[in-house]
Image (cartoon, rainbow, N blue to C red):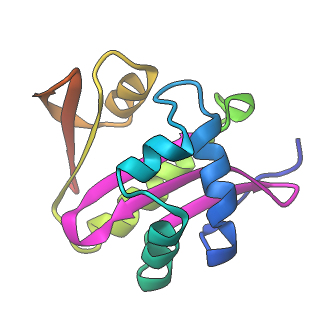
Amino acid sequence: MNEIEFRVARLADVEGIFHVRTAVTENAMTLQQLEEMEITYSSVAEMIAEARCAWVAVDAQSIVGFSMIIPEDGCVFAVFVLPAYEGKGIGKRLLKAAEDELFKEHEAIWLETEKATRAAEFYRRMGWRNEINVGDGDIYLEKHRF
C-alpha cells in the first residue's frame, strides 16, 4: 500500500465512489438497489458539481474510500472504505473531513445507520451520541460542534 491521498472528490471520481459503495461487506448494496433509492452516477455527479460535499481516499490512483454529506441538511450521508483498507484510519479521516465541512454551517450534525453494525460502533467511538431508534433496525445519531 502506498501513502493514501485524501482530497475533495471530483467529477472523475464518481465511478470509483460507486465501486467502493458496491464492494463493501457491511450495508452492501447493488447498483440497482442504489438506483431504486435515486442514488445514481448522475445524481452523485450533480451533488459533487454543486457543492463541496464529498471526499475520497486514493491509493495508487484508485479510490479506496469516500465520505459524502448533504450540506444543507447537516447530514453525513455516507462513509465507506474498501474492506482491504479497513482498520487503517481511512474512515476516521474521511469522517473528520465531512464533519469539519458541516460544522462550518451547523452547530449539530446527524446521520443514520444500522444499529447492530461495526459502523454504528465506529460512529459512537468517534463521539456521535443522542441515539434514537428510527425503525427497521436503524438509528439516528448526532454530534455537536462543541
Residue 81 visible in the picture: no
Of 92 and 8, the residue lying toward us: 8
Displayed quadrant of residue 128: top left
Displayed quadrant of residue 12: bottom right
How many dots with numbers? 0
Of 39 and 56, the residue lying toward us: 39
Quadrant holding the N terminus? top right
In the rendered structure, does residue 63 fall within the stretch colored magenta?
A: yes
Of 113 and 43, the residue lying toward us: 43
Q: Is residue 145 above or below residue 87?
A: below
Residue 102: x and y in percent read 31, 65
Quadrant holding the C terminus? bottom left
Q: Write the residue at 84% across / 61% down.
A: 61
Q: Write the residue at 62% across / 55% down.
A: 17
Q: Is residue 16 above or below residue 34?
A: below
**On the rendered structure, is 111 left or right of 69?**
left
Q: Hey, which residue is sitting farthest bottom in the picture?
A: 50
Q: Write the residue at 28% across / 21% down.
A: 115
**On the rendered structure, is 40 left or right of 102?**
right
Residue 42 visible in the picture: yes
Q: Write the residue at 30% across / 36% down.
A: 127
Residue 53: x and y in percent read 43, 70
The boundaries of the magenta stretch are 54-81
Classified by dominant secondary structure, the portion drawn in magenta counts as: strand
Residue 77: x and y in percent read 36, 52
In the rendered structure, does residue 56 fall within the stretch colored magenta?
A: yes
Q: Is residue 117 above or below residue 95?
A: above
Displayed quadrant of residue 38: bottom left
Residue 32: x and y in percent read 50, 45
